[in-house]
Amino acid sequence: MHNCVAIVPCRAGSKGLPNKNFLMLGSEKLYQITLDQALRCVSEVIISSDKNLEEELKFYKVKQHQRSPELSTDQSTMAELMLELIRQYELQNSTIVLLQPTSPLRRDEDILKCIENYKKNNFDLLFTVSSQDRAVLKSGFVQGHKFIPVGEPEFTFMNRQDLPKLFRPNGAVYVFNGGWFEKNGGFTSTNMGVVEMPSENSLDVDSQEDFDSIARIYKKYSKN
């Protein structure tokens, strides 16, 4: 893909599931599955890690960004990392494709569809979503004794099947322009596009339970 750069963030530390980006899934580590996928879809790939991966990456045509300690803590944000990479690698004119290793069930076609839709439309940011239980729309915040609906007030009293379909970002793919992101200072926008992914492919590794579920699905795919 012309003028596209894939970024794979690969921090070693994690509270929810220690060292999760380096867990073995099948015959590869999680981050390697994403690297292979990135290289199949995008010509230029940058992996950002606080761990020295020089030996493990010797057979990969990728650039390794050594992440600073300041950007490797649990308090560090993805936006801060993106800004550093955009400035260091001068990606202001590039279409950035952010691929997180914790979404190993993501398909190549999901990435390519996101890039295609982003380039065809005038979105600031495009990302993948999966369907969400629409009953969430009946929820709200409580301030003192007052109920504040998360959506339209009438949603609180509607039958679940009558509520509008609901989707959530699944973290698998994000596409945006580097210059826009630098100027904007982060992901937040009112002009966002989406590509829907099947729920089964949208699982994200955040806990041991998540990883075990993904491992079972991954094993089933590998047999087919």
Image (tube, rainbow, N blue to C red):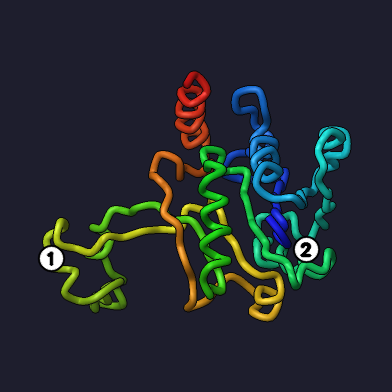
**Residue at (77%, 48%) from the top-left corner?**
49
Q: Residues within 10 Å of mark 2 (few under 14, many from 20)?
A: some
Q: CA distance from mark 2 to mark 1?
A: 46 Å
Q: Nearer the viewer, mark 2 or mark 1?
A: 2
**Residue at (49%, 76%) from the top-left corner?**
191
Q: Secondary structure at mark 2?
A: helix
Q: Position of residue 138 (x, y in %)?
A: 22, 64
Q: Position of residue 147 (x, y in %)?
A: 24, 75
Quadrant (top left, top right, bottom left, bottom right) of the N terminus: bottom right
What residue occupies the far top of the structure in this picture? Answer: 223
Q: Position of residue 120 (x, y in %)?
A: 53, 67
| Residue with the mark numbered 1 | 158
The amino acid type found where label 1 is placed reads: Met
Quadrant in the rendering for residue 20: top right
**Residue at (79%, 48%) from the top-left corner?**
50
Q: Position of residue 213 (x, y in %)?
A: 45, 31
| Residue with the mark numbered 2 | 85
The reply to whether callout 2 and callout 1 are in contact (CB within 8 Å) is no
Please, is residue 13 above or below residue 157 in the view?
above
